Image (cartoon, grey):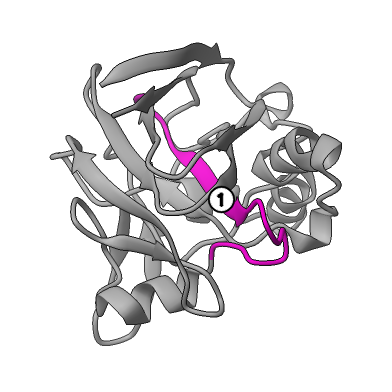
Amino acid sequence: MKKLREETVPYNTGWAGELKKGQVIRISGTTTVDFVAFSIQNLRERFDQARTKVYNMKIFISAGDKLMSKSNQHLMTIVEDTYREGTHDLQKGTCSGYRFQLAKQEGRLREYYHRDFKDEEIPDHGCWENLSQALKPYGIAPEDIPSPFNLYQTMKIDGVTGRMEHTAIRPRPGTYVDLKAETDLLVAFSACPDLPVGGKPVGVAIYEP
């Protein structure tokens, strides 16, 4: 593949860019990445967690699986996935500054993130704000940002009770996921603050066949 663009996205910031049909975006990192996608032809045609799970008939998706829109359009295909330590998440929404403060007020930071925090360690923003800022130039209102495909966010899910728990399982250095655009797309992601383990920068590259 021919590399067209490559960047490093700093910790707890967002990134957005356009993909032509057939192009591949590679997202590499050792931290959670909240990823969303929109059809360029109709920005209201966007990635949908529920449709994606039903189409693939599973809650953990990987190489060969498709990302779907709410009207069941194929937006992307995962063409390569080198994450072997855990699974990607299709259950959670985005973190946010308000979410962190609410957990603090309720005394539930340890319950959610399995460690204690000093006040200065609690971020004033998260993936919600990062995606909102990255997508603002494209006219995407924050409330129109879908719940994301959470790359590298391994969740422990009880199959009987449905209870979810965070884990500290994350990728080894050099891990990446390649996603191919099945139509012209606007894509965006957030390099999550990833409170259970601490966020890190995320690498992004765009290729064409």
Instruction: Tell me if 128 is positioned left or right of 114 in this view.
Output: right
Instruction: Tell me if 122 is positioned left or right of 85 in this view.
Output: right
Q: Pick the residue in front: 142 or 185.
A: 185
Residue 107 visible here = yes
Tell me the residue that label 1 is attached to. 36
Q: Pick the residue in front: 75 or 62.
A: 75
Instruction: Tell me if 163 is positioned left or right of 184 in this view.
Output: left
x, y percent for residue 100: 70, 46
Outermost residue, bottom direction?
160
Instruction: Give the crowd class for mark 1: few <14, some 14-19, many >=20 residues within 10 Å.
Output: many
Residue 191 in magenta stretch: no
Residue for point 51% across, 35% down: 194
Q: Pick the residue in front: 12 or 62.
A: 62
Most frequent secondary structure within the magenta stretch = loop
Element assignment for label 1 = strand
Instruction: Tell me if 135 is positioned left or right of 65 in this view.
Output: right
Residue for point 27% across, 40% down: 169
Q: Amino acid at mark 1?
A: Val
Q: From which residue to which does the magenta span run?
A: 29-47
x, y percent for residue 180: 35, 44
Residue for point 31% across, 16% down: 2
Q: Can you say which quadrant of the picture contains the N terminus?
A: top left
Task: Name which quarter of the figure residue 162 lies in.
Answer: bottom left
x, y percent for residue 68: 44, 68
Residue 110 visible here = no
Say above or below: 51 vs 178: below
Residue for point 20% across, 38% down: 83
x, y percent for residue 71: 55, 80
Say above or below: 203 vs 131: above
Q: Can you say which quadrant of the picture contains the C terminus?
A: top left
Residue 42 in magenta stretch: yes
